[in-house]
């Protein structure tokens, strides 16, 4: 096996620290072919679907990829913009915000990029670009506040699989979760309060998280517990009671039992119970995407209103708001400790460069 090297490598190249922000991914276009390629990669990941591969291969290729791409493409078209998928451009904007902060503090010594676990830009292509720039220490931030094997661990798999093919592996730090990180809780609370200052307070605040199979919880995945801790801390920060807030789980598929209560069933029940006004926020989604804009903002709105509800408000994700960028940079700074970028040292860059060149020769 031939391992990947570094093109035109020079020992005089300055070592840099890299920050890689990752998110789930998105099709390249809102059309069936692109959605099919994306779904094939996504649903072929055994972290996502834990069914024996031989059985799942027939289900995926014989049924799901024959039916679902056209329907999903239609849904994607409802949220697509001139900049493409919301998940893609919000993640790009978050990366730009973090990059601006790091550039202002550390100059060119910290490289900030983003990648998608599935689709483009791929994890391997971005790591390659960072390594060519001299990144020798890599801090990875998966944009999943609550840890799950289906998301966070899958991202680690992608990093590890890439490293297995490289000649020079950078020193690695990996942020597993930040579900109870105080600046993140503060940013969400301030964001919700700003929305309510404009739109008023509802009878109920629903905090909807992406669902996972209940079996994962029973086998030790901490995701369920971390979601509820986030909800508890956010409820306390907002000065609300447990009766004011409902935690739910959305986006399930298949026939097995997933984490409950289900978001769609809760929407219907709230309307039937006479609740007239609700607002929904998704603390596990740092970026707006199909699951928040279309599934929550449209589909679940209809469930609530058809059941008798009158006022439904979807509170957008934090996206690239200043408070969110502040929280992300605070989290990254915490994990960068001990990796002192060159810009924080006393020597000037020019002196460092001369010394490096001399040593290299």
Image (spheres, grey):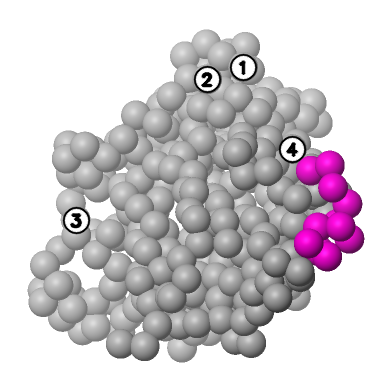
**Cα distance, mark 4 to mark 2?**
19 Å
- Report which residue position mark 1 lands on: 237
Circle 2/circle 3 CB separation < 8 Å: no
Q: Position of residue 135 (x, y in %)?
A: 62, 64
- Report which residue position mark 2 lands on: 233
Circle 2/circle 1 CB separation < 8 Å: yes
For residue 326, the mark is 4
Circle 3/circle 1 CB separation < 8 Å: no
Is residue 347 part of the magenta span, yes or no?
Answer: yes
Helix, strand or loop at label 3? It is: loop
Please indicate, yes or no, whether residue 295 appears anywhere in the rendered image. Answer: no
**Cα distance, mark 1 to mark 4?**
18 Å
Is residue 267 part of the magenta span, yes or no?
Answer: no
For the point 75% across and 50% down, which residue is it?
342
Helix, strand or loop at label 1? It is: helix
> Which mark is in front, 4 or 2?
4
Q: Main secondary structure of the magenta part?
A: helix
């Amino acid at each position: 096996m031939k391992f990947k090297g570094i093109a035109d490598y020079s020992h005089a190249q300055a070592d840099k620290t890299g920050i890689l922000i990752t998110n789930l991914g998105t099709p390249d276009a809102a059309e069936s072919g692109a959605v099919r390629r994306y779904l094939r990669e996504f649903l072929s990941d055994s972290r996502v679907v834990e069914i024996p591969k031989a059985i799942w291969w027939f289900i995926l290729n014989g049924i799901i990829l024959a039916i679902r791409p056209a329907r999903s493409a239609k849904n994607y078209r409802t949220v697509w913009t001139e900049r493409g998928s919301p998940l893609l451009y919000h993640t790009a904007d978050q990366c730009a915000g973090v990059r601006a902060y790091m550039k202002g503090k550390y100059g060119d010594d910290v490289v900030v990029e983003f990648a998608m676990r599935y689709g483009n830009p791929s994890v391997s292509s971005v790591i390659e670009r960072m390594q060519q720039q001299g990144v020798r220490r890599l801090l990875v931030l998966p944009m999943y506040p609550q840890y799950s094997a289906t998301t966070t661990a899958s991202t680690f798999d992608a990093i590890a699989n890439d490293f297995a093919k490289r000649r020079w592996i950078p020193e690695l730090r990996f942020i597993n979760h930040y579900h109870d990180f105080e600046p993140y809780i503060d940013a969400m609370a301030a964001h919700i309060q700003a929305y309510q200052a404009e739109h008023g307070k509802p009878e109920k605040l629903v905090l909807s998280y992406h669902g996972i199979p209940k079996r994962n919880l029973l086998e030790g995945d901490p995701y369920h517990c971390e979601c509820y801790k986030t909800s508890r801390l956010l409820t306390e920060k907002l000065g609300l009671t447990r009766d004011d807030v409902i935690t739910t789980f959305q986006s399930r598929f298949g026939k097995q039992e997933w984490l409950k209560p289900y978001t769609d069933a809760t929407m219907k029940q709230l309307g039937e119970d006479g609740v007239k006004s609700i607002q929904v926020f998704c603390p596990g989604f740092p970026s707006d995407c199909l699951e928040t804009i279309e599934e929550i903002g449209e589909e679940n709105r209809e469930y609530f209103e058809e059941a008798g509800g009158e006022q439904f408000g979807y509170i957008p994700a934090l996206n690239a708001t200043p408070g969110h960028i502040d929280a992300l940079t605070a989290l990254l700074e915490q994990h960068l400790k001990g990796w002192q970028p060159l810009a924080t040292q006393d020597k000037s860059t020019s002196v460092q460069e001369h010394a490096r060149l001399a040593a290299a020769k």
